[in-house]
Image (tube, grey):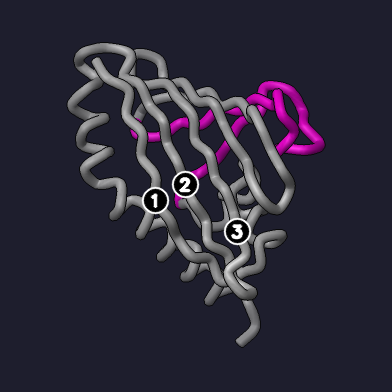
Amino acid sequence: MTRTRLTGRITVALPPAKAFGLFTPHGERAWVEGWDPRFPVPVTDDTEPGMVFETHAHGRRTTWLVIAREPGRLISYARVTPHDRAGTVTVAIGDAGGHSEVRVTYVLTPLTETAEPALREFAAHYPAYLRSWEDAIAAWLRRTLPA
């Protein structure tokens, strides 16, 4: 089994301070269909390092932990999906002249040999996956920002 590192970039038509909110557990609800993080204990700041939440997608539960943040610039998560994969997701946001360039890096390790093919498939489609993020955010912005 091998660890997989994937990095790509998307553009968000917001300045970094506003784009940052789209990549927080609560903020992703705006543009990710079906995203519904559950917090085992009440939280006042969903970006605070050490904060834990869970998601359910594709019939699997994933536990997430905020491991680093620089408000408006970076948020990093550790994530574990039992019997599937574990790793980190880091979202780094840079200013691109009033817009944001967002670098998204996944570092994932399959937890079983049977999980390797799905991870290879995820890696093969990673550019399209990030394009879907960019498209979903752009569509959300069109619906919510005044013309």
Check the image and report above or below for 128 versus 40: below
Q: Residues within 10 Å of mark 2 (few under 14, many from 20)?
A: some
| Label 2 with label 1: CB-CB less than 8 Å | yes
Choose between 102 and 136: the one closer to the eye.
102
Magenta stretch: residue 144 in it? no
Q: Which residue is mark 3?
A: 94
- Separation of marks 2 and 1 at Cα, in angstroms: 6 Å
Query: Mark 1 belongs to which amino acid?
Result: Gly
Which label was assigned to residue 104? 2
- Separation of marks 3 and 1 at Cα, in angstroms: 13 Å
The quarter of the rendered structure image containing the C terminus is bottom right
Coordinates of residue 104 in the picture (x, y in percent): 47, 47
Choose between 87 and 46: the one closer to the eye.
87
Query: Mark 2 belongs to which amino acid?
Result: Val
Q: Residues within 10 Å of mark 3 (few under 14, many from 20)?
A: many
Magenta stretch: residue 49 in it? yes
Which label was assigned to residue 8? 1
Side of 51 relative to 126 (left or right): right
Secondary element under disc 2, as helix, strand or loop, is: strand
Coordinates of residue 93 in the picture (x, y in percent): 59, 54
Task: Find the magenta span and give its range.
Answer: 33-58
Check the image and report above or below for 113 versus 6: above
* Secondary structure character of the magenta stretch overall: loop
